[in-house]
Amino acid sequence: MTKQQYEKISTPFRENPRALFLLTRMDKGITAGIFAAYPLLLLYLFFTEREKCLPCLFIPAVSFFLISVFRKIYSAKRPYEVLDITPLICKHTVGKSFPSRHVFSAFIIGMTFFYINKPLGIFVGILGVLMALVRVVGGVHFPKDVIAGGLAGILWGLVYFIL
């Protein structure tokens, strides 16, 4: 993504305070919603299908840890570091952009839901796609970051929950 491409996709939000407000609330709201739903799923499993509770806890936890270690080692720069832009989403982190951990987490949690309840898993996956779009438009991730995060979450979930 170039600075001009970013400006083209972000200008409608920069010029419209309501759109910018919606974008920033979507970033916080989707994140909070997914991460609040996950412990509720674990609690549900604890009382109904206890044998699935530990895998649904440890598979996302281990994968989150591994993605975090990879990001720290690889430490790709963020759009606002490379393109000299002001992101729409307030972020001060340096590096650690690839892959998007927010999007990865949304998709691994979505795969966990999919393992238990397919319609809920699809719904969380749709929220993950929206989150990916928001993170790119917000200027805190490149498209490759969110695509890699989403694919990693889906593939990790497929390997451990589905296959």
Image: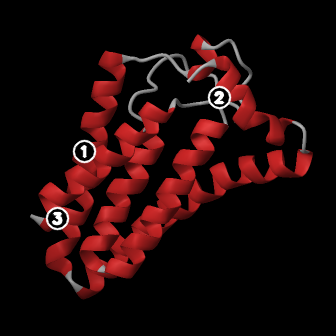
Image spot of residue 75 (x, y percent) = 39, 17
Residue at disc 2, secondary structure: loop
Which quadrant of the figure contains the N terminus?
Answer: top right
- Tell me the amino acid under the disc marked 3: Phe
- Tell me the amino acid under the disc marked 1: Ser
Q: Which residue is mark 2?
A: 91
Label disc, if present, on residue 81 of the rendered structure:
none
Residue at disc 3, secondary structure: helix
Kindly check if marks 3 and 1 are in contact, taking CB atoms under 8 A apart as contact: no
Image spot of residue 27 (x, y percent) = 64, 49
Which residue of the protein is positioned furthest toward the left in this rendering? 163
Specify few, some or many for label 2: CA neighbours under 10 Å numbering under 14, 14-19, or 20 or more.
few
Residue at disc 1, secondary structure: helix
* Mark-to-mark CA distance, 2 and 3: 33 Å
Q: Is residue 88 visible?
A: no
Q: Residue at x 65, y 58 (%)?
A: 29
Which quadrant of the figure contains the C terminus?
Answer: bottom left
- Tell me the amino acid under the disc marked 2: Lys
First in sequence, mark 2 or 1: give its number.
1
* Mark-to-mark CA distance, 2 and 1: 24 Å
- Mark 3 or mark 1: which is in front? 3
Relative to residue 50, is residue 10 drawn left or right? right
Q: Which residue is mark 3?
A: 161
Q: Is residue 22 above or below residue 33?
A: above
Image spot of residue 60 (x, y percent) = 28, 53
Q: Which residue is mark 1?
A: 63
Kindly check if marks 2 and 3 are in contact, taking CB atoms under 8 A apart as contact: no
Q: Nearest the camera: 88 or 137?
A: 137
Q: Residue at x 58, y 12 (%)?
A: 82
First in sequence, mark 2 or 3: give its number.
2
Which residue of the protein is positioned furthest toward the bottom in this rendering? 48
